[in-house]
Amino acid sequence: MTIYKRHYACFNCQKTFKRRVLKDVDRDQQTSVEAKCPECGSLMANMGLDFKSPAKSDDKQWAHIKDLYTVGITFHSCGCSGPGYIPQDHRAIISYLEKIRSEYMHALVFWRYRIEPENKKERELEFQKNGSKLRAVSNNAFKQTVTNQEGINYWLTKIKEVEERLALIKST
């Protein structure tokens, strides 16, 4: 299997570089060294395998790429189907994050009104009906009951993360 080089971006120089995976260089290494720009020496952003660099002179597109990276949107995938949806401008990033927040709020409502199963049979029936919602919170959802409080805490944390990203992007 081929290991492809990841694309790293330097927002200061507005340049990208590919970098070998550390295991290619030294198979015994466990931790990777942070990527530094060969030109200015600042830390570079790991943008993923599917990143296509804008022109060095395209300041607007570089600012957008930096906004994407700031809120955690990168171009990582296995290479088969691409990185998924990438917002194309500042407003689209805000809209995208608000949509995610709305989906998380909807999941939170499920956990607030859910009736916890009292025995194994009820738990198995619930898993058949709501397995994807239960697995989102716990990988052991089939074997043990996931409490409502666990689900509520999980989704409140996810909502808080998205709201922090929204605050970041709205402040730029």
Image (cartoon, rainbow, N blue to C red):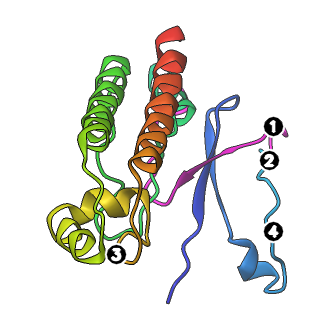
Amino acid type of disc 4?
Thr
Q: For the residue carrying disc 3, how many other residues have a C-alpha within 10 Å: few (<14), some (14-19), or many (20+)?
A: some
Whichever of labels 4 and 3 marks the residue nearer the N terminus, that label is: 4
Inter-mark Cα distance, 4 to 3: 34 Å
Is residue 50 covered in magenta?
yes
Whichever of labels 2 and 4 marks the residue nearer the N terminus, that label is: 4
Q: Nearer the viewer, residue 102 or 139?
A: 139
At x 32% / y 37%, what residue is drawn?
A: 108
Q: Nearer the viewer, mark 2 or mark 3?
A: 3
Residue bearing mark 4: 31
Q: Nearer the viewer, residue 10 or 80?
A: 80
Q: Considering only vertical position in the picture, is 19 above or below 104?
A: below
**Image coordinates for residue 150, horizontal then vertical, percent:** 47, 49
Inter-mark Cα distance, 2 to 4: 15 Å
User: Could you tell whether 61 is left or right of 131 in the image?
Assistant: right
At x 44% / y 26%, what residue is drawn?
A: 61
**Element on which disc 3 rests:** loop
Q: Which mark is residue 36?
A: 2
Q: Considering only vertical position in the picture, is 14 above or below 153?
A: above
Taking the image as drawn, is residue 47 in sight?
yes
**Element on which disc 2 rests:** loop
Inter-mark Cα distance, 2 to 3: 44 Å
Whichever of labels 1 and 3 marks the residue nearer the N terminus, that label is: 1
**Element on which disc 4 rests:** loop
